[in-house]
Amino acid sequence: MFDYTTKNIEDVKIGDIIITYNEETKLQEPGEVVKVVSPMRSDIVEYELSNNVIIKSTTCHPYWVIDKGWSSFDPELTKRLYDFSVEQIKENDILLSIDNDEIIIYNITELITKEII
């Protein structure tokens, strides 16, 4: 959240103020949540990061990658589901933390699951 508190993604609601990244100014700034999408999906990917964090998300979830822009594990699915063009996210791509620290994606694993998340 923009006040540096945290909440589970499923608890974020319209009107919440979150931290956004301005692609033009390269700065973080407040942004209001104007739409919430809650898909039930089973295509999950795991990103192992250089700050010892592991992120699990859908394969079409976009992330901001330094020198590349918005990227996802499955750009075609991102485009088909959200009409949003992104690049291919890869190992060694660099993300920004909330503190503007550069975080490297060390490993990407596509998870096989029958469970719908």
Image (cartoon, rainbow, N blue to C red):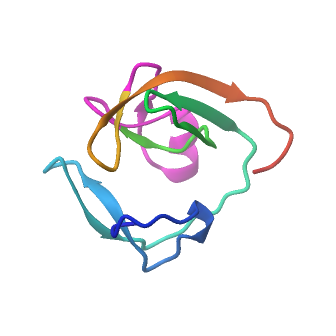
Instruction: Write down the quadrant of residue 68 in the picture.
Output: top left
Horizontal placement of 106 versus 10: left or right? left
Q: Is residue 36 above or below residue 114?
A: below
Instruction: Say which of 33 and 79 sits in front.
Output: 33
Vertical comparison of 72 with 11: above or below? above
Residue 87 falls inside the magenta stretch: yes
- Outermost residue to the left: 25
What residue is drawn where x is 34% and y is 67%? 2
Q: Horizontal placement of 65 versus 107: left or right?
A: left
Q: Which quarter of the figure is the N terminus placed in?
A: bottom left
How many marks overall? 0
Q: Is residue 107 above or below residue 87?
A: above
Residue 86 among those drawn in magenta: yes
Question: 14 left or right of 44?
Answer: left
Q: Is residue 90 above or below residue 51?
A: above
Q: Position of residue 87 (x, y in %)?
A: 40, 31
2 relative position to 8: left or right: left
Please state the horizontal and vertical placement of residue 107, each as a whole percent of the image. Answer: 54, 21
Q: Residue furthest right?
A: 114
- Residue at image x 34%, y 50%? 98
Toward which corner of the image does residue 20 lie, by quadrant? bottom left
Chain part drawn in magenta = 65-93
